[in-house]
Amino acid sequence: MQKEYKTITEISGPLVFAEVDEPIGYDEIVEIETPNGSIRRGQILETSSSAVAIQVFEGTSGIDKNSSVRFLGETLQMDLTEDLLGRVLSGAGDPIDGGPPIEPELQRPIVGSAINPYSREYPQEFIQTGVSAVDGMNTLIRGQKLPLFSASGLPHNDLALQVARQATVPEEGDGDDGDDTEFAVIFAAMGITQEEANEFMDDFERTGALERSVVFMNLADDPAVERIVTPRLALTTAEYLAFEQDYHVLTIMTDMTNYCEALREIGAAREEVPGRRGYPGYMYTDLASLYERAGRIKGQEGSITQLPILTMPSEDITHPIPDLTGYITEGQIIVDGALNSQGVEPPVDVLPSLSRLMDDGIGEGFTREDHGDVADQLYAAYAEGNDLRDLVNIVGREALSERDNRYLDFADRFEEEFIQQGFDTNREIEGTLSIGWDLLSMLPPEELNRVDEEFIETYYREDERAEVEAEA
């Protein structure tokens, strides 16, 4: 029998404090009934033998010391069914698309259950996003967690939507029988504006991507506490689709900065001693509890791949949010303001970007045997051309050698032809590598010291080099 209390002692921001006469479980769900009869849901954030702190999902407006508190004896559960695909839910997991009520096949606690490290399968197999800067240079691998580091005002949302509608596992690189090469997409938006929400939904509906997606929408004017729940609801859904329905699941979470701001707000309401820049000292652990829910399990066909997005405050990569995220995840994709101002779409800066698991998902059997060499040589040539731009600002192009001028031209064409592709273009990996060889053929073969001679004989394009020399 549910026990009811009228012992609220304090209301602070999103938190309600109440006295109890028996221990209450951590994370237990609470119903708070206000004097006017409305019901609010909450969750136990802190508990002792005589008092509890409750975070209220719908906000504390209207709650006073005359409100009653009921403890339900269970943690927050997510209603799960394959019919969630194609649905739009609130940040609290309630349908907001006008569709029929969800009839769950089962329920699962949103905190998830840890994957036994022994049962984890090493992330492997190439995911084709259709974006050359990712596929060619910073490859996403099935089961990986690869965040997008961006800044306010940059088109990271456009890039996320492009990946959401284009992501596939090519059949020749698929470790199973290739029956399900497309990803189911879990899209969790946290603290976004109504305008952004409308853009997301318009794109999902226009491209038909919504049919294979589950969308969670937590808006900027929704309670901060709900923002803490949204990614956990999304990941619980992802685990169900991946490990019980055998889907390959791509989970996109935006914006993790808004999530961390909600953590800081709740920490301040609890009067916790702040850590770096006012964020809670346990933020690393909290983020890890989300990011580590990506992966593959031995004997299971499905997988969870994560693409978290965060906006770096003041474009500071040393800020606690990107800094801690970088420690937990396996690389980062950097969205660059300078490239964006040049009109490059998507404006991905490949030089500071990194995919730590790239080598495990490319090459023969996954993409193409020359992929690794091409990526290394493109990186080296673009880095050299980029460095020479600083020198040109000092001495001018006339003072540079023919070789240096060729690398400068290479850097310009790399941005214009390889990175630039627009947000509506879906490039196959063969097309990406073909553009890479067009660019490398601008350079004499002896400059391609990171590429195997066998690949140079097969893919090097003398006609491209002849054209460049004629222009020079």
Image: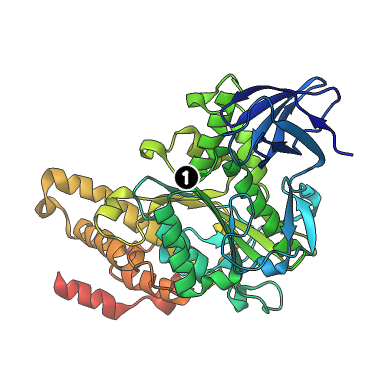
Q: Is residue 310 visible?
A: yes
What color scheme is it?
rainbow
Foreground: 270 or 368? 270
The x, y position of residue 175, in whole percent, is 69, 71
**Amino acid at circle 1:** Ala
Judge from the rendering whether residue 77 lies leftward or rightward of residue 183; answer left or right.
right
Provide residue 262's location: percent of width, then percent of height.
54, 36
Residue 104 location, quadrant: bottom right
Q: Position of residue 312 (x, y in %)?
A: 42, 41
| SS at mark 1 in the image | loop
- Front-most of residues 125 and 259: 259
Residue 229 coordinates in the image, percent (x, y):
63, 44
Residue labelled with disc 1: 220
Image quadrant where residue 99 sits: bottom right
Q: Residue at x 77, y 53 (%)?
A: 108
Left/right of residue 403 with respect to residue 22 in the rendered view: left
Residue in view at x 85 percent, y 33 percent: 3
Please state, as top left, top right, bottom left or bottom right, where the C terminus lies in the image.
bottom left
Q: Which quadrant of the figure contains the N terminus?
A: top right
The residue drawn where x is 38% and y is 69% is 436
Residue 342, located in which quarter of the rendered image?
bottom left
* Whether residue 373 can be seen here: no
In this rendering, position of residue 213 left or right of residue 441: right
**Label 1: how many residues lie within 10 Å, few (<14), some (14-19) or many (20+)?**
some
